[in-house]
Image (spheres, rainbow, N blue to C red):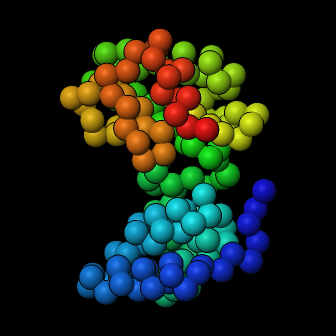
């Protein structure tokens, strides 16, 4: 479902302007601008890309490139709680594949899908930067490290 006529709030525009003022070029503020917009709208729609491009004085493609490069940005609607399971070397060696399999089984979805109740969308993540706590997953902005498949129900229960 596409957001149409997306207009950034004045608060977001002010945050973007403050961020842009920190850099020698306005393009350097794209990632922060997208982070603020995603926090507001839940995902980065074409309307958000257009609005961010307008605020920063950029071409839409310059904003879209950033939105599609980083796996922390969602270019389609996602559940209330995006779940990202790290699948990089440290996590994989310590059982991330089993965590992903158990998570998808418990939620009744495949990787990339959203649960029927709209609560969770499951993603594989290249690296979440918590190698010392492998295997790990992020639910929204919360990190859960040293995971075991039998702990997933308790972790997910905290996200109602």
Tell me: residue 9, above or below residue 93. Answer: below
**In the rendered view, does 29 fall on the left or right side of 11?**
left
The structure residue drawn at horizontal position 78% and vertical position 56%, both measured from the top left corner, is 1
**Residue 11: x percent and y percent?**
51, 82
Query: Can see residue 1?
Result: yes
**Residue 49: x percent and y percent?**
59, 71
**Residue 133: x percent and y percent?**
26, 27
The structure residue drawn at horizontal position 54% and vertical position 15%, both measured from the top left corner, is 102
Along the viewing direction, whichever of 27 and 140 lies nearer the viewer: 140
Tell me: residue 148, above or below residue 80. Answer: above
**Residue 100: x percent and y percent?**
50, 21
Res. 106 image quadrant: top right
Along the viewing direction, whichever of 107 and 87 lies nearer the viewer: 107
Tell me: residue 3, above or below residue 50. Answer: above
The structure residue drawn at horizontal position 31% and vertical position 22%, both measured from the top left corner, is 146
The structure residue drawn at horizontal position 60% and vertical position 79%, both measured from the top left corner, is 8
Q: Quadrant of the C terminus?
A: top right
Residue reaching furthest to the left: 132
């Amino acid at each position: 479902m596409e957001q149409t006529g997306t207009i950034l709030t004045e608060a977001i525009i002010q945050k973007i302007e403050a961020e842009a003022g920190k850099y020698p070029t306005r393009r350097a503020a794209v990632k922060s601008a997208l982070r603020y917009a995603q926090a507001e709208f839940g995902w980065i729609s074409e309307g958000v890309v257009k609005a961010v491009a307008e605020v920063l004085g950029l071409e839409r493609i310059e904003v879209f490139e950033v939105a599609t490069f980083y796996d922390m940005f969602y270019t389609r609607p996602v559940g209330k709680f995006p779940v990202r399971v790290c699948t990089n070397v440290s996590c994989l060696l310590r059982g991330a594949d089993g965590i992903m399999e158990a998570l998808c089984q418990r939620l009744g979805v495949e990787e990339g899908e959203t649960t029927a109740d709209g609560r969770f969308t499951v993603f594989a993540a290249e690296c979440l930067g918590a190698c010392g706590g492998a295997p790990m997953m992020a639910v929204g902005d919360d990190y859960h490290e040293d995971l075991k498949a039998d702990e997933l129900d308790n972790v997910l229960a905290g996200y109602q």
